[in-house]
Amino acid sequence: MKKTFKKVIALCLCLAMILSMSIIGASATKRYTDCNGDCEHYPAIIVPGLGQSNTWIVDDNGDFLLDDEGNKISSFPAYIQLDKIIARIAAPALLSLALQKDAGLSDAAADVIRLCFGINTCDENAQTSPNVVTERYPYPASEYKDFEAEEVFGHVPFNLYETEQPYDHMYYFTYNSFGNHIDIVEELYEYIQMVKEQTGHDKVTLIPLSQGASVVSAMIDYKPEVHDDLHKIIFVVPALDGSTIIGDVFNGRISFLNKEYLYNGFLGELGLLDKGTAALIEVLLRILPDEVITAVLESAVDVLVSEVMTTSTGMWALCPSGDYPTAAEKYLSTPDKANIKAQTDKYYQAQLHADANIQKLVDNGVQVFCFVEYDTPMINVGETWNTQNADYIIHTDSTSMGAHFANVGETLPEDYVQQNTHCSDPTHNHISPDRVVDASTGLLPDTTFYFDGQRHDLTARNDVILKLALNLIESDRIQDVYSLPEFPQFNIARGSEKLVILVNQAKAIDPATLSAEDAAELAAAIAEAEKVIDSTIGVVGEVEASEARVTACLVKAGVMEAPEEDGVSLDIFTQISPWIYENFGTDGYSEIAVLMTMKVLQTVVDTVMNFI
């Protein structure tokens, strides 16, 4: 009897423990949805690109560092401390200027890079500084505070467009772009499990953007069990095989370290400055001898690459597989880099397996889509910038999984025919209308969409890309590039956010305050603009023409002032800089002065000799 009673007590205690554990588990996972996983909307997780996650600097006590206005200080891309920079560089800069030689300026430049980017240097195990923390969003968009929504939708402005996807089914995963790639993969895997628990769904949709694609590609290689967790992947301009910018930098193929190029168009081709400003800077650089400028740039780049970038496995994951072996040999061959190399070697293998891994997903029923932008020259940091098609940041072979492209500004040969490497349907035409792309050689020809002339860094402004992504997120109505005629396989670059703002201003005007003619033109301009905005098939120049028409109406109605012309034009320097280069090469002004003096003296001597 006593033994039976003890067994009953033990059973009760066991059941109590199980019950308490289940209660703890239930309380630890909060449900943010009412559907309990029983709805047609799979939760969507955005995996953002480079620098699209907030990383903050904290002190050794874990308290956030704040600027003079009380705002948290970001670690990306660097920690700028202007007073310390000036203190370090002012004296050697003035001395170098006075002596017209490198009087410690290159060393100062190296120290400034360490000062600014040192916060992102990883240790020998590729672990980031404990003084950098990443802001997390372990809950759906429906729970965001205003500042969180502003941050997230500032990067991916889905909030500007109508969607059937409920906000309690939309998530934003964050990570440190300079961080440990293997750790980030593990964090994403755990994040997926958390989202499944929070929503009750057994699968999720992933939207990797740019660098985020390297994380997802690694995850499906390192953790194949995640395949069962995935309903759909929507790659948006993905860095699936890195960027040749990083490959060039890691392998020392840096264009602006060539002084002939630095003084002859580099800044203008860079695309970050207007031509006049770029030419002005070229002119001002000559205040120092070219060997000083070159020494400063080489010193700064060496520290940035060897001490910061090469310690980050997140950065290594952006190195193309074709560039990795030589770069790894250059920077990771010493014993102190062995742990980092073991991790980067692992990702290198994932890169090599990427196409096979993605095909395996498709074969197992996971829907995989891809958005590619093309025909925008690569930013000219690396020497190979003009040797392939690109979207300004990533070469198209990486984003398209192997589609064939003519180079920027060129077309495929007249006798070129579709290769059908990955398409066996003879009725499919995967040659772009502009004859730049053969999409049939890409891994997923029937589920990859292309946007001509779209810049990588301006993707979030392309309303068609955002609308297409939302359509793919909210339902399975789109199965391939032929599903909806309003979303064709080949489209163009555009951005309608400015036009939307102008239309809203125009709608606020009371037509009764205008003449009949002006009121009619206003109504016609609004109608035309709304038609443009609603269209998802781009027409070159259409948005800009509509903006100009609505702007003219706003100006005439007195709502907006006419755009002013720039007061001082710097275009004159676009003529001055090439003239100096043509006549004096890369020489600084002191060298030019010496050269001119020598020429004058030689002329005087020649003149005197003619009289003797």
Image (cartoon, helix red, strand yellow):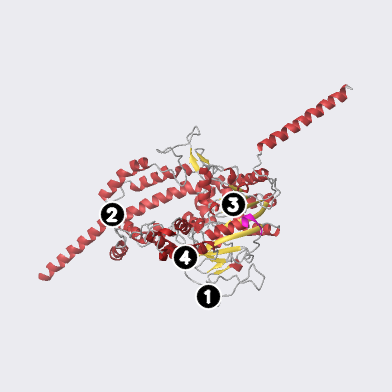
> Closer to us: mark 1 or mark 4?
4
Q: Nearer the viewer, residue 292 or 493?
A: 493
- Say if the magenta span includes residue 21: no
Query: Residue tagged by mark 2?
Result: 287
Structural distance between the alpha carbons of marks 2 and 3: 45 Å
Label 4 CA crowd tier, 10 Å (few <14, some 14–19, many 20+): some
Structural distance between the alpha carbons of marks 4 and 3: 56 Å
Residue shown at 65% from the left, 73% from the top: 427
* Residue 45 place in picture, x, y as percent: 61, 50
Label 2 CA crowd tier, 10 Å (few <14, some 14–19, many 20+): some
Bounds of the magenta span?
472-476
Label 3 CA crowd tier, 10 Å (few <14, some 14–19, many 20+): many
Please tell me whether the stretch drawn in magenta is mainly helix, strand or loop. Answer: helix
* Placement of the N terminus among the 4 image quadrants: top right
Can residue 321 be seen here? The reply is no
Structural distance between the alpha carbons of marks 1 and 2: 47 Å
> Closer to us: mark 3 or mark 1?
1
Can residue 458 be seen here? The reply is yes
21 left or right of 524? Answer: right
The amino acid sitting under disc 3 is Tyr
Check contact, mark 3 vs mark 1: CB within 8 A: no
Query: Residue tagged by mark 4?
Result: 524
Structural distance between the alpha carbons of marks 4 and 2: 55 Å
